[in-house]
Image (tube, rainbow, N blue to C red):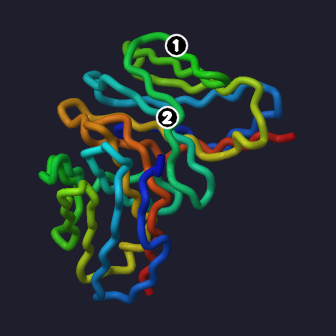
Amino acid sequence: QKEVEQNSGPLSVPEGAIASLNCTYSDRGSQSFFWYRQYSGKSPELIMFIYSNGDKEDGRFTAQLNKASQYVSLLIRDSQPSDSATYLCAVPPPGSNYQLIWGAGTKLIIKP
Amino acid sequence: DAGVTQSPTHLIKTRGQHVTLRCSPISGHKSVSWYQQVLGQGPQFIFQYYEKEERGRGNFPDRFSARQFPNYSSELNVNALLLGDSALYLCASSLTDQPQHFGDGTRLSIL
């Protein structure tokens, strides 16, 4: 089992709708979780991070963490065509907070 | 404020050559990490340096080496290049460990 798993997509969402991206992780001891956005040919850009169970909101973005079920989600409200990108979930392994273990990313397409 | 800067942006090498990639962190950041990203995959951790000391190394061969300078900039060196080393090499900086902020990357092509 991969340590961090994401559905590769593509996930197609109409403009203005809510896009829901999911990530599961294997190590129960993981404490922090990061979402990055990567446009084609560009580098990852940090969107949000979350440490505690529950929801964390930042503008149109909401991160949801459920440690019991070992998944973390990213919701994008009022999706815009500019949100079309690959979304990467990253988790530091327990005891090695200096590195990130990454999922392969979910490609999101927002259709006008 | 300037973000993480990497140079060069693109590089073409042939098998067997060596390459040096450079990274300048965000001002005030003491930690620099290097990642390799192959097309269609998430980045893979190569190294992290904090205060000029190597704190961690990923599952990469000894052909990969790095160092961090007193001004916290960093170099990644790869010797005896293989076709499989073709990738986007990413540098990230952080105050301590997380969160990490990435530069634009160096795209390395091996012919």
Amino acid found under the numbered disc labelled 1:
Asp
Q: Is residue B73 above or below residue A53?
A: below
Numbered disc 1: what chain? A
Q: Kindly identify the residue that appears in the image at 41 percent across and 38 percent down.
A: A90
Count of numbered circles in the view:
2
Amino acid found under the numbered disc labelled 2:
Trp
Q: Judge the density around disc 1: few (<14), some (14-19), many (≥20) Cα neighbours within 10 Å.
A: some
Q: Is residue B70 above or below residue A25?
A: below
| Side (left or right) of A50 relative to B25 | right
Place of residue B33 in the rendered image (x, y in percent of width and height, measured from the top left): 30, 51
> Dividing the picture into quarters, in which one does residue B47 lie?
bottom left
Q: Kindly identify the residue that appears in the image at 77 percent across and 36 percent down.
A: A80
Q: Is residue B89 visible?
A: yes
Q: Which mark is residue A55?
A: 1
Place of residue B60 in the rendered image (x, y in percent of width and height, measured from the top left): 23, 62
Q: Is residue A101 above or below residue A68?
A: below
Place of residue B46 in the rendered image (x, y in percent of width and height, measured from the top left): 27, 57
Residues indicated by labels 2 and 1 sit on the same polypeptide chain: yes
Does the residue at mark 2 contact the one at mark 1 (Cβ under 8 Å)? no
Mark 2 lies on residue: A35
Q: Kindly identify the residue that appears in the image at 40 percent across and 28 percent down.
A: A33
Q: Judge the density around disc 2: few (<14), some (14-19), many (≥20) Cα neighbours within 10 Å.
A: many
Numbered disc 2: what chain? A
> At numbered mark 1, what does the secondary structure look like: helix, strand or loop?
strand
Which residue lies most toward the right here?
A112
Mark 2 or mark 1, earlier in chain: 2
In the rendered image, the quadrant that contains the C terminus of chain A is: top right
- Mark 2–mark 1 Cα distance, whole angstroms, equals 14 Å
Which residue lies most toward the left here?
B53
Place of residue A83 in the rendered image (x, y in percent of width and height, measured from the top left): 70, 40
Q: Nearer the viewer, residue A74 or A8?
A: A74
